[in-house]
Image (spheres, rainbow, N blue to C red):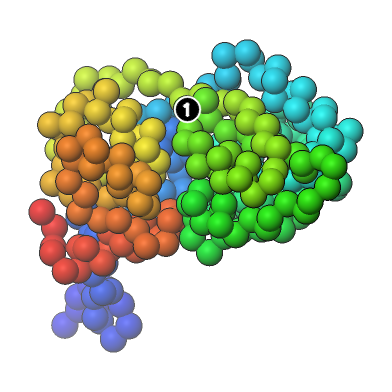
Amino acid sequence: MTGDVDGPGGSAPPRKPLTGWKVAVTRARRQASALVAALSRAGAEPLAVPTIEVADPEDGGAALRQALGDLVAGRYHWAIFTSENTVERVFRAAGGSGDFSGVRVAAIGPGTARQLRERGVEVELVPGRFVAEALAESFPPATRGAERPRVLLPRAAAARDVLERALSHKGYEVDVVTAYRTVRPLLPPDLVEAAALTDAVAFTASSTVTGWIELLGAERLPPVVACIGPVTAATARRAGIGVNVEAEIHTIDGLVAALEEYAVTNGRP
């Protein structure tokens, strides 16, 4: 007697918690691959629904290029990177390479730090929790002197001012420079319809939440809403969106793991 053998000893491979789940991925198109791959490994069927796209700042990056010139000239003590988008945009403005040898560098989380290290930048500070508040808390107080030490903080055009206020209070002179802005892409109607029929949506930033609301509407949400961390979840709740999953580890892998845990407990909606 013969038959299909699915695994060792003829047993079928274990069913993954997200098998059969259709999950909307809201990251920008160019950045969605990591989350799409992680969800696929977990058995899910990801659907790319980019609710944001990353664009140049209004000045075309002139202020950022000027700030990078000041950094090379030794006028900054620290540079802070709060997202992988920021890393990509800073290095694009620097012509693909940057000289950070004379400045101390902080990153908000491991993904951002990895992007920097892959470009040869030594990262000195990564907080235990991957949010601006934790980065501000872990930042050392400024050494008192005739001048306040300067910090370069490149970021999105619309971003919270938590770091700027906290570091100013700690004695730093913080220069906030717009590195990019998020804009709304045009989504084809059939993609909008497919997104509304998914089992879950994964929000990876506050901008993806507001993008979904503007493009699809808060009433057209899947049954399960998953957020990468507390800031994104707070944005969703302020918009009247119930959050089912909030990752404790604020990374792509942490978000997928939290969604898997929810699936194990609650099953597919």
Residue appearing at x 26%, y 23% in the figure: 215
SS of the residue under disc 1: loop
The answer to whether residue 29 is left or right of residue 110 is left
Residue at 37% from the left image edge and 46% from the top image edge: 231
- In percent of width and height, residue 224 lies at 18, 49
**153 over 200 or under it: above or below:** above
Whether residue 161 can be seen here: yes
Pinpoint residue 252: horizontal percent, then vertical percent: 43, 54
* Residue 198, visible in the rendered structure: no
- What amino acid is labelled 1 in the image? Ala
Q: Residue furthest right?
A: 73
Residue on which disc 1 sits: 158
Query: Could you say which is closer to the camera, residue 26 or residue 189?
Result: 26
* Residue at (31, 35) in percent of width and height: 209
Marks counted in the figure total 1
Which of the 4 quarters of the picture holds residue 94? top right
Count residues near mark 1 (Cα–Cα under 10 Å), then give few for <14, some for 14-19, many for 20+.
few
* Foreground of the two, 69 or 37: 69
On screen, residue 185 versus residue 199, left or right, reads right
Could you tell me which quadrant the N terminus lies in?
A: bottom left
> In the rendered image of this protein, does residue 179 appear above or below residue 235?
above
Q: Which residue corresponds to the image point at 20% horizontal and 68% vertical from the top-left? A: 264
Give the quadrant of residue 18: bottom left
Q: As rendered, which of 33 and 107 lies closer to the eye? A: 107
Does 205 appear above or below 220?
below
